[in-house]
Image (spheres, rainbow, N blue to C red):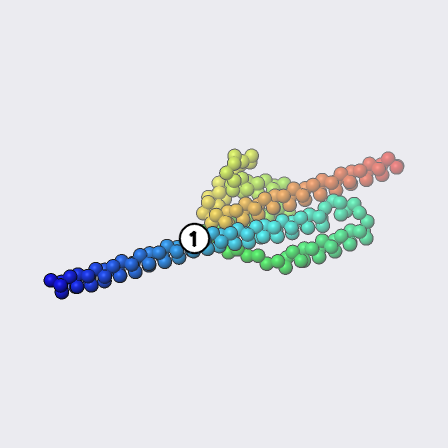
Amino acid sequence: MAQAKIQAKAGDGHNGGRFCRSMSMAARSSHLLEVLDDLEIRVQTLRDSASALELEKETLLEMIHNVKNSQDMRNISDGEREELTLTAERLMGRTVTVEVSVETIRNPQQTLSLQQATSIIDEILKKVMDNLEGGKKLLMSLYASCISDVPSVPIDQKFQSVIIGCALEDQKKIKRRLENLIRNIDNSEKSITLLEIQKQKAVLLQNNKI
């Protein structure tokens, strides 16, 4: 009888030991999961910060380019223009030395969709120099395919189906690229218009002198 009680206690102790170890493993697993959850948040914050830096770099380069090619630069003396142009080029050179890269994780289908979307945009850009207004309309049609709001121009259905197949980060980058391209064309149109106005004024002044 006594021997049976001793064996029973030994068995209880053995089972209890296994139960305690099991609880300890569960606790460690839960702790590690919490650590990984926190790290996932930090990783996403890192990617978001890097993406914001990418956008800031693009914005700075565009602003420097716009200043360098602005109408105001044409309305100052040659000496001042040369000095300001050198300053703008120096700033642009410093900006491009900042390397920020956020790689997007894609499956094969998303990679193919990105290639197709990029190809469509590049083909339109080849036509822009020959037909600025027509190229702008095509780019606006592509941009309308990327937004959820009701567009003011017709949507390019083919491009929209391609965009849907892209990774979410690529969709955002393509939309941003189209915004920049359209804005650059707008700035070019303004410069051309101002130049035409100046020419007309020069002709009028010359006629009045005659």
115 or 171, which lies in front?
171
Q: Identify whether 111 is placed above or below 148.
A: below
Report the front residue among 30 and 148: 30
The residue under the point 52% across, 34% down is 150
In the picture, measured across the screen, residue 24 lies left or right of residue 46, that is left
Q: Is residue 131 visible?
A: no
Residue 71 position by quadrant: top right
Above or below, 127 relative to 3:
above
10 Å neighbourhood of mark 1: few (<14), some, or many (≥20)? few
Residue 115 location in percent, x, y?
50, 52
User: Which residue carries the number 1 mark?
Assistant: 37
Q: Most extreme residue toward the bottom, as rendered?
A: 3
Q: Quadrant of residue 2?
A: bottom left
Q: Amino acid at mark 1?
A: Asp
Local secondary structure at mark 1? helix
Q: At which x and y percent is residue 27? A: 35, 56
Instruction: Confirm whether residue 140 shows in the render.
Output: yes
Residue 178 rendering spot, x and y as whole percentages? 57, 45
Q: Left or right: where does residue 137 sit relative to residue 157? A: right
Residue at (50%, 49%) from the top-left corner?
169
The residue that appears at 58% across and 52% down in the rendered structure is 53
Which of 61/161 is in front? 61
Q: Residue at x 37, y 54 (%)?
A: 30
| Total marks placed | 1
Residue furthest to the left = 1
For the N terminus, the quadrant is: bottom left
